[in-house]
Image (tube, rainbow, N blue to C red):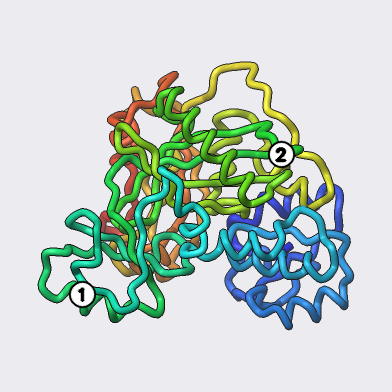
């Protein structure tokens, strides 16, 4: 299993029921490092992973929740024929945002995009703002917004030409779609509303079921099927992010690895579908199970607890209205008295809120989310 962090814990628990599992990772503080078969190796280093693959000779290789784990797994699959992975050509398209945009260049749901080599302001046929994205990256890291009316903007953009490209800035609500395929058909899919907090471009809260209309969900599903066809996906997960501007759907990115931060737990708590087990099924040579909804979804909010100040972790308090929330579960990522930095690296855990509503509105989601705070030390409150 490639990955030993918190998001890999559900994988390890399920796999351990039927297999001898070797969790492989190189971060000293990861929670799975204390398991008996732990392999201390950097899964971003193919030579290290190849050494342990030859030594252990695993029957299967399962990637956890990041691009590097999936890429390394795909490289191993190309050499040793492990099941479940896309071919390297399609894998590279998914991992490189520039290649992904080019694959969809002629599609109406793909924002206009452009390289930064020999860029002139007159060459940019976009709106007043553009968004610069790194060719590769995750969690919004390295993404920047530029105002084209600013005098120095072209020089600033040219400074990024080796690492970034630009695309038309689209405003709208953020959503994700997890689609599970079997025999080239979607057999289970889930729509989630997402929100970014203090860390721009990084999702910090989400809810299922989505508030999107059925018409919009159908439009997203059709796009997902088209992307899956282009990527030659027959089975397994295709997870995508979209923007909806009130009239039209725009694709942000797609991935075949599992989203992190216990995204699967959100879907499982709300729907009862075994997200993690079915994500791993193709990597174990098994079929993805179809989803048959037999009862209404439970409304669940997933909230990341991220520190906006630096300090030692004291307590975590969850504040909310008694008539809004039925149940709260908190999954800690940190321990008492441990130093917590600012931003994404200072994430101390994930809270799941069960909301008293058959259908969660955007306003209700924001109300629930705004009531969750952490406390660093003994006196400082942070959102």
Q: Toward the viewer: 118 or 275? A: 118
The residue lying at 66 percent from left, 64 percent from top is 89
The residue lying at 86 percent from left, 77 percent from top is 54
Answer with the quarter of the image where residue 341 lies.
Answer: bottom left
User: Residue 242, how many percent across, how many down?
Assistant: 42, 44
Judge from the rendering whether residue 274 lies leftward or rightward of residue 361; answer left or right. right
Element under disc 1: helix
What mark, if any, has residue 184 been given in the picture?
2
Relative to residue 42, is residue 364 depicted above or below? above
The residue lying at 86 percent from left, 65 percent from top is 58
Judge from the rendering whether residue 187 lies leftward or rightward of residue 175; answer left or right. right
User: Residue 250, how many percent across, how many down?
Assistant: 39, 44
What mark, if any, has residue 217 been given in the picture?
none
Residue 194 seen anywhere in this rendered image of the structure = no
What mark, if any, has residue 154 been given in the picture?
1
Instruction: Please tell me how many numbered marks the rendered image carries.
Output: 2
Q: Quadrant of the N terminus?
A: bottom right
Q: Toward the viewer: 354 or 181? A: 181
Q: Residues within 10 Å of mark 1 (few under 14, many from 20)?
A: some
The residue lying at 70 percent from left, 78 percent from top is 46
User: Residue 261, how many percent across, how many down?
Assistant: 52, 52
Task: First in sequence, mark 1 or 2: give its number.
Answer: 1
Q: CA distance from mark 1 to mark 2?
A: 44 Å
Q: Toward the viewer: 374 or 198? A: 198
């Amino acid at each position: 299993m490639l990955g030993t962090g918190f998001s890999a814990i559900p994988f390890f628990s399920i796999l351990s029921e039927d297999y001898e599992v070797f969790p492989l990772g190189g971060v000293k503080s990861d929670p799975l490092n204390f398991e008996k078969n732990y392999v201390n190796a950097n899964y971003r280093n193919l030579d290290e992973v190849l050494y342990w693959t030859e030594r252990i000779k695993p029957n299967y290789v399962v990637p956890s929740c990041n691009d590097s784990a999936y890429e390394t797994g795909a490289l191993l699959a190309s050499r040793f024929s492990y099941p479940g992975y896309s071919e390297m050509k399609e894998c590279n398209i998914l991992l490189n945002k520039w290649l992904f945009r080019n694959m969809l260049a002629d599609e109406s749901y793909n924002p206009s995009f452009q390289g930064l080599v020999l860029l002139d302001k007159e060459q940019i046929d976009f709106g007043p703002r553009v968004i610069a994205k790194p060719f590769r990256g995750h969690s919004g890291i390295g993404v920047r917004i530029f105002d084209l009316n600013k005098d120095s903007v072209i020089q600033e953009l040219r400074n990024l030409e080796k690492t970034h490209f630009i695309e038309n800035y689209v405003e709208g609500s953020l959503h994700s779609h997890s689609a599970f395929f079997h025999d080239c058909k979607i057999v289970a899919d889930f729509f989630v509303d997402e929100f970014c907090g203090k860390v721009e471009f990084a999702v910090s809260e989400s809810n299922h079921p989505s508030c999107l209309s059925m018409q919009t969900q159908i439009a997203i599903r059709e796009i997902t099927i088209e992307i899956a066809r282009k990527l030659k996906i027959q089975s397994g997960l295709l997870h995508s992010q979209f923007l909806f501007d009130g009239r039209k759907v725009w694709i942000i990115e797609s991935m075949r690895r599992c989203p992190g931060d216990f995204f699967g737990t959100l879907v499982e708590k709300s729907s009862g579908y075994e997200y993690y087990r079915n994500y791993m099924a193709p990597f174990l040579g098994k079929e993805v199970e179809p989803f048959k909804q037999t009862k209404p979804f439970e409304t669940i909010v997933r909230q990341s607890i991220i520190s906006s100040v630096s300090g030692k972790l004291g307590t975590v308090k969850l504040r909310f209205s008694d008539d809004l929330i039925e149940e709260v579960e908190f999954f800690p990522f940190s321990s008492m008295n441990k130093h917590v930095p600012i931003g994404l690296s200072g994430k101390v855990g994930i809270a799941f809120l069960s909301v008293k509503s058959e259908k969660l509105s955007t306003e209700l989601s924001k109300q629930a989310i705004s009531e969750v705070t952490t406390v660093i030390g003994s006196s400082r409150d942070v959102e």
